[in-house]
Image: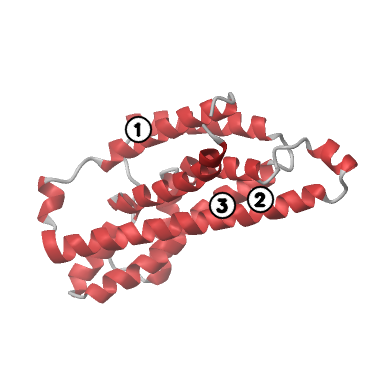
């Protein structure tokens, strides 16, 4: 992979995962659509997407925090291997249990309930774990891959600068991911509400639970390749 492509690859990954998460009905747009249909209001759909997006963003932000905290104690290579194994094990679990879902209390929910539900769903499905390889690559690009002890001795304050730059990049990555997810969620919910109706979910919709499990395994494979220095 050439230098220019290597620089934009993690950003494209965050954008692509955002679109993929937004298309998955299990991440929230189906919930928002159901509320809109119940209240016969398109406005309710759009308003419901806001706390859903915020809850999802919090789950992704926690993954970014784990990256920043992890790099304070172990090397980038070690964290890459740890992430790869965690993704593989979780992906393997989801592959054989993709039909299981966290339970919810019902459809009478407020904005706070939607926020909490979205955060729990994203966490339970490993949304943050899925994007961690891309977040690690962003941190690497900001100089966090250097040996910290040697870096601090030779360049006092450099680690703090690297951490600050990496933190800024990671938060921007979380924002890019969330915006892509909201855009796809909104378009998908609007198309089902206005054009296709719920019948499309029974007749033509695909098994996103299985696809999600496969995506976790693909992300694990990419994480292993990154840990080996292949990509």
**Mark 2 = which residue?**
166
Instruction: Tell me the CA gap for discs 1 and 2.
Output: 29 Å
Per the rendering, the mark at residue 134 is: none
Per the rendering, the mark at residue 62 is: 3
The local secondary structure at tag 1 comes to: helix
Q: Is residue 223 above or below residue 117?
A: above
Please identify the quarter of the rendering in which residue 193 is found: bottom left
Q: Position of residue 45 (x, y in %)?
A: 27, 69
Residue placed at 22% from the left, 64% from the top?
190
Q: Position of residue 200 (x, y in %)?
A: 12, 52
Residue placed at 58% from the left, 40% from the top?
137
Q: Position of residue 95 (x, y in %)?
A: 35, 31
Labelled pair 3, 2 in contact (Cβ < 8 Å) = no
Q: Is residue 84 above or below residue 197?
A: above
The local secondary structure at tag 2 comes to: helix
Residue placed at 53% from the left, 29% from the top?
231
Residue placed at 71% from the left, 55% from the top?
164
Q: Earlier in the sequence, mark 1 or mark 2?
A: 2
């Amino acid at each position: 992979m050439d230098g220019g492509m290597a620089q934009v690859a993690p950003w494209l990954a965050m954008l692509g995962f955002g679109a993929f998460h937004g298309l998955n009905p299990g991440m929230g747009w189906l919930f928002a659509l159901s509320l809109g249909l119940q209240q016969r209001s398109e406005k309710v759909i759009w308003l419901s997407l806001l706390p859903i997006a915020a809850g999802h963003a919090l789950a992704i932000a926690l993954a970014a925090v784990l990256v920043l905290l992890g790099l304070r104690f172990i090397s980038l290579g070690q964290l890459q291997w740890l992430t790869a194994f965690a993704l593989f094990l979780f992906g393997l679990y989801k592959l054989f249990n993709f039909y299981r879902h966290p339970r919810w209390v019902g459809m009478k929910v407020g904005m706070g309930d939607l926020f909490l539900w979205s955060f729990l769903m994203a966490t339970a499905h490993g949304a943050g774990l899925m994007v961690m390889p891309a977040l690690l690559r962003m941190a690497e690009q900001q100089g966090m891959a250097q040996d910290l002890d040697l870096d601090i001795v030779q360049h006092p304050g450099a680690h703090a600068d690297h951490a600050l730059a990496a933190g800024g990049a990671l938060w921007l990555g979380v924002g890019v991911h969330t915006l892509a997810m909201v855009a796809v969620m909104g378009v998908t919910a609007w198309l089902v509400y206005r054009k296709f109706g719920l019948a499309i979910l029974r007749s033509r919709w695909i098994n996103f639970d299985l696809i999600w499990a496969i995506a976790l395994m693909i992300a694990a494979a990419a994480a292993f390749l990154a840990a080996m220095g292949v990509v």
